Amino acid sequence: MKLLYWLEEWTNLPRDEQQSLVPMTGGDLLGDVYVKYHIIDANKPLLITFSPAGTNYQEHDITDDFSPWAYKLAKKQDVNIIAFQHLGISNWFRHRNLLFFIEQLAPLIGGFKERLGYGLSRGGFAVGAFANLLKLDKVLLFHPVSTKNKEKAPWDDRSSTDIAQKFDWNGDYHDLDLGHAKGYIIYDPTNRIDRAHAKRYPQLTHLRVFGMGHSVHATYLNKFGFYKDVAVDFISHQQVDVAQFRQQTKTLRFKEDYYRRLNKANKSSPHRLALLSTAHTILAEEKAEHMQEQKDAIDVQPLIDVAIKHQDEHPNDAIKVLEVAQQLSPDDPVIDHKLKQLK
């Protein structure tokens, strides 16, 4: 637990002495959780992350170069990072070594400019459960699980709930406890279990993404950088541009296979398929209108200028450039005139 000893000394030093001792990078094994940290400046935010399900590493996977979930992303945004990576498949951050570590860590991070939390699903549970203890200022949660306590969440009948019952869901840190933290929760309101969990976070700003799902389709969204773009916004600016977020989700719907994958993920629900079919028809028309708006907004003048500049020495290349410009703006009379001249 080198980080705890180091922080205890470092946080009590004058500013100039602190900076002479960073960056501080290392890692520790806390029972069935591995923590890796990179501390660079107390005047920059400290991001604390917990890994989601699906990142099922084992202890033998931990090497000097190993990076927990979101660790590299935080380093690229030039913030302090403490990243917790669960080991094994059924792991809900309940190991007593981990709990002891976080309890010791909490009073040592109060001097950082701002304390942020970021997690998906199982990782979102951990951020919510430890938020008050760590005095987090802001959090970003994607479809988090608020608890696996069956009395508090009787509607969570996923198989993972039964598997998780081998852990203590009545002791410390078994349920969400945000304290004064503010921030954002992102989820699919058509997923009844995620919607019910989300309702337990009333103090957060709710951002809904229809069709996002919880696991299968969430992986698909990640291929388009959906999670990353929102996380970078949050880490860099400590907030999410809600207007941009909504535009991003609108653009996502125009991906060619968006509804095909949604239909596949929901093939067992005739009612849901009918709703998706109706929505797809509406959005097909919306997409055509959107594409036309995009074409109308394109400025083809730079292409025309390049073609005119090189038309004498490279007339064939100029024609190709103008043909591209004509595809983008088919009704432009200048392009039509120049093409007739060169041909």
Image (cartoon, helix red, strand yellow):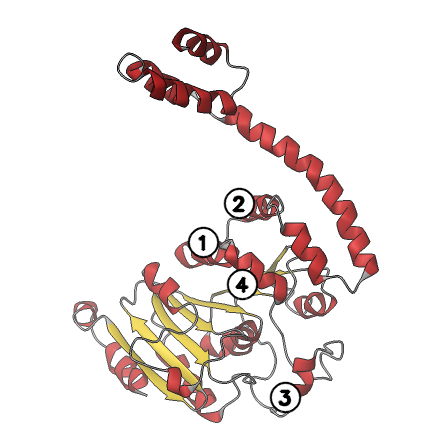
In the rendered image, which residue does mark 1 sit on?
A: 233
Q: Residue 286's spot in the image, x, y percent?
A: 68, 36
Q: Secondary structure at mark 4?
A: strand
SS at mark 1 in the image: helix
Q: Quadrant of the N terminus?
A: bottom left
CA distance separating discs 3 and 2:
38 Å
**Amino acid type, mark 4:** Lys
For marks 1 and 2, the one nearer the N-term is: 1
Q: Where in the figure is residue 83, as x and y percent of width and height?
A: 40, 74
* Residue 244: mark: 2
Alpha carbon separation for disc pair 4 and 1: 15 Å
Residue position for label 4 = 182
Gap between marks 3 and 1, in whole Å? 33 Å
Q: Nearer the viewer, mark 4 or mark 3?
A: 3
Residue position for label 3: 169
Q: As drawn, is 125 to the left or to the right of 60?
A: right
Residue beneath the point at 51% across and 58% down: 227
Mark earlier in primary sequence (4, 1): 4
Lateral position of residue 15 relative to residue 210, left or right: left
- Element under label 2? helix
Q: Residues within 10 Å of mark 1 (few under 14, many from 20)?
A: some
The residue positioned 79% from the left and 52% from the top of the image is 275
Label located before the other in sequence (4 or 3)? 3
Ranked by sequence position, the earlier of labels 4 and 2 is 4
In front: label 4 or label 2: 2
The vertical placement of 237 against 152, above or below, is above
Nearest the viewer among 60 and 183 is 60
- For badge 2, the amino acid type reads Gln
Going from N to C along the chain, the mark reached first, 3 or 1, is: 3
Q: Which residue is nearer to you in this view: 262 or 205? A: 262
Amino acid on which the number 1 mark rests in the picture? Asp
